[in-house]
Image (cartoon, rainbow, N blue to C red):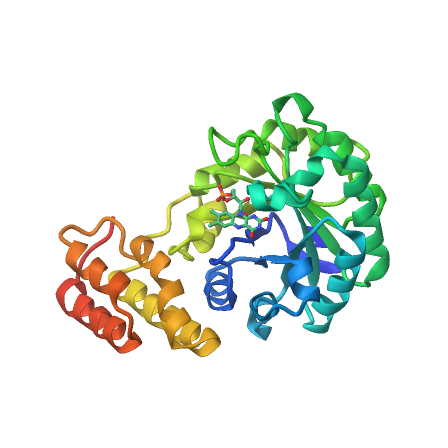
Amino acid sequence: MAKIGDIDVGDFPLLLAPMEDVSDPPFRALCKEQGADVVYTEFISSEGLIRDAAKSVMKLDIYEKERPVGIQIFGAVEESMLRSVEIVEASGPDIIDINFGCPVKKVVSKGAGAGILKDIDLMVSLTRAMVNHTKLPVTVKTRLGWDHDSIKIVEVAERLQDVGCAAISIHGRTRAQMYKGDADWGPIAEVKNNPRMHIPVFGNGDVNTPERAIEMRDKYGLDGAMIGRASIGYPWFFNEVKHFMETGTHKAPPTMKERIEAARRHLQMSIDWKGEVLGVFETRRHYTNYFRGIPHFKEYRMKLVTSDQSEDVFSALDLIEKEFGDYQFV
Ligand SMILES: Cc1cc2nc3c(=O)[nH]c(=O)nc-3n(C[C@H](O)[C@H](O)[C@H](O)COP(=O)(O)O)c2cc1C
């Protein structure tokens, strides 16, 4: 049974990865309904939060039904990170997560995200300061290292644990790899096999089938799997993994009607949360996966991703139900 601080997250929990512009409250709620055990917000800039930048502050919204939820922040300046811990705490998350893995240049160039992998002492001291500044469990999400020649993740994880980090999620790539190549879970298993480690070690990167999730548990011995891209437009992935773990068989994919219903609810929740314009716009990226693999669907997909008014998107979904309602997914 894995625990993040005092929070019981079950046996081999499945975590929804933080994903910018994806892991928002509506999507997190859908993933939670479909079996995610812990969900994380997208990363939020500590500098943005302390400037009270509206876009950053909005990202702090959480729904009761998605708990336990972690809010992820990034930054490299201790004072800003501590101030943002206070701001984050006020919105009542269960966990505060630090992003030490974002590979994007504009983040890394400020020494934040994966940039901190070049200064492990700072990574450890920032974590210590944050742990000491809050009663909430502080978790870390990071990568294997800056590049292939500087992988010290076993030592890094142990040091983070020693300053009070409550759990660590490790993406099996280096910063230099960005998203290229395959994620390497071997070094994550080395972290887990370190006899001094007692906090949960969650694996991340390329868990895209139930079989891969089982491999992470049984072959690599990790404490849980953090899932990102496989869930985009496919929140059912979490329950499919769980079903496979329990029965050894594949769960039938969601029916067309279930997909249409999820798309409708996703759109409605997005509009309720961020208004018509952004709600319509930001739900678009999910439709391709909701309706992947259906022949002769292009014209309908185009309607979903080019309509600016929610009523047009809802009408397109009605039309899809009429035309494709009986389509059988295999
Ligand atoms: C669209 C997108 C946005 C992401 N945004 C974040 C983020 O805000 N914070 C973070 O720690 N990682 C972020 N990531 C990385 C994911 O959390 C995850 O580490 C990565 O996608 C590998 O896992 P996967 O193979 O299951 O997708 C993002 C990834 C994607 C695809």
The residue lying toward the viewer, choosing from 289 and 282, is: 282
Left or right of 281 in this view: 99: right
Residue 202 in view, yes or no: no
Residue at 32% across, 53% down: 289
The picture places residue 260, in percent across and down from the top left corner, at 28, 66
Left or right of 157 in this view: 183: left
Residue 92 in view, yes or no: yes
The picture places residue 318, in percent across and down from the top left corner, at 21, 73
The residue lying toward the viewer, choosing from 221 and 204, is: 204
Q: Is residue 219 above or below residue 319?
A: above
The picture places residue 103, in percent across and down from the top left corner, at 57, 40
Left or right of 206 in this view: 56: right
Residue at 63% across, 38% down: 222
The picture places residue 235, in percent across and down from the top left corner, at 42, 57
Residue at 68% across, 72% down: 91
Q: Is residue 273 above or below residue 198?
A: below
